[in-house]
Image (cartoon, helix red, strand yellow):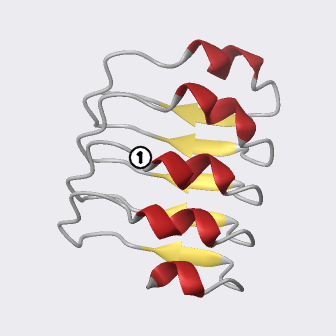
């Protein structure tokens, strides 16, 4: 599974018709860049907030409706692109993420 690739720094899953990210993605403790645009992802796995090295998360053109309330555990995350999703709201914890430098939730 993808979770066994523990040295992975960058993962591009664009354009794969994915309905979800695997729960094992949380095992990728060295992952810095995750790009998964143009899929059909509607929720993030519970293990997502274990991605402690993640600095850039691009999940544009998906079907995300919400982010986990524990999203603020991603303390290395600086750049977030969630444009063109179905977000109903952002978690309150995002207000505490003062380290974010770029947040795109357009459309």
Relative to 96, is 70 above or below? below
Taking the spot 67% from the left edge, 83% from the top edge, the residue there is 6
| Location of mark 1 (residue) | 44
User: In this picture, is 90 found above or below 23?
Assistant: above
Residue 45 appears left or right of 11: left
User: For the point 43% across and 85% down, which residue is it?
Assistant: 1
Q: Secondary structure at mark 1?
A: loop
* Quadrant placement of the C terminus: top left
Q: Position of residue 51 (x, y in %)?
A: 67, 57
Nearer the observer, 75 or 23: 23
Q: Is residue 72 left or right of residue 17?
A: right
- In the image, residue 87 sits, relative to residue 20, either above or below, namely above
Residue 46: give x, y in percent of width and height: 49, 46
Give residue 74's quadrant in the image: top right
Q: In the picture provided, is 85 more to the left or to the right than 26? A: left
79 in relation to 33, above or below: above
| Residue 20 or residue 103, whichever sits in front | 20
Residue 38, percent from left and from top: 25, 58
Q: Quadrant of residue 87?
A: top left
State which quadrant residue 4 falls in: bottom right
Q: Position of residue 82 (x, y in %)?
A: 43, 39
Asked if residue 31 lies left or right of residue 11, the reply is right
């Amino acid at each position: 599974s993808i979770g066994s690739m523990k040295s992975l720094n960058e993962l591009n899953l664009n354009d794969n018709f994915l309905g979800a990210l695997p729960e094992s993605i949380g095992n990728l403790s060295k992952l810095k860049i995750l790009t998964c645009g143009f899929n059909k992802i509607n929720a993030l796995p519970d293990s997502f907030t274990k991605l402690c090295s993640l600095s850039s998360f691009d999940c544009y053109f998906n079907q995300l409706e919400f982010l986990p309330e524990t999203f603020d555990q991603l303390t290395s995350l600086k750049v977030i692109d969630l444009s063109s999703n179905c977000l109903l709201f952002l978690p309150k914890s995002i207000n505490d993420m003062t380290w974010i430098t770029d947040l795109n939730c357009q459309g």
